[in-house]
Image: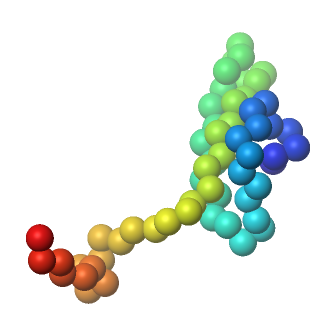
Amino acid sequence: MVKDSDFDTGIRPKSTNKILTLSTCTGNGYSKRFAVHAVCIDTQTTDQTKLKETDD
């Protein structure tokens, strides 16, 4: 993934990282694709049982 990138962001994901991939067609029909990959660095939850209450 990094080797074939058009842009060097300096990020080197590990095989244990969670990766999000977005892909779209950019040419006539389906002749070309453009993909954007993102590395998850933090997760959040909406599960009320896991959320901590804070005093603001």
Residue that appears at 25% across and 82% down: 52
Q: Residue furthest top?
A: 28
In-front residue for pair 30/22: 22
Residue 26 spot, x, y in % from top left? 67, 21
Q: Residue furthest left?
A: 56
Q: Give the quarter of the figure containing the C terminus.
A: bottom left
Residue 45 sits above or below residue 35 on the image: below
Residue 41 horizontal side relative to residue 13, left or right: left
Q: Quadrant of residue 19?
A: bottom right
Residue that appears at 39% across and 68% down: 44
In-front residue for pair 12/44: 12
Q: Residue furthest right?
A: 3
Residue 22 sits above or below residue 49 on the image: above
Residue 8 horizontal side relative to residue 19, left or right: right
Residue that appears at 71% across and 41% down: 9
Residue 24 horizontal side relative to residue 7, left or right: left
Q: Quadrant of residue 16?
A: bottom right
Residue 36 spot, x, y in % from top left? 64, 39
Residue 55 spot, x, y in % from top left? 12, 77
Q: Residue furthest front?
A: 56
State how many labels appear.
0
| Colour basis | rainbow
Residue that appears at 63% across and 64% down: 18
Q: Quadrant of residue 3?
A: top right
Residue 43 spot, x, y in % from top left? 46, 68
Residue 44 sits above or below residue 49 on the image: above
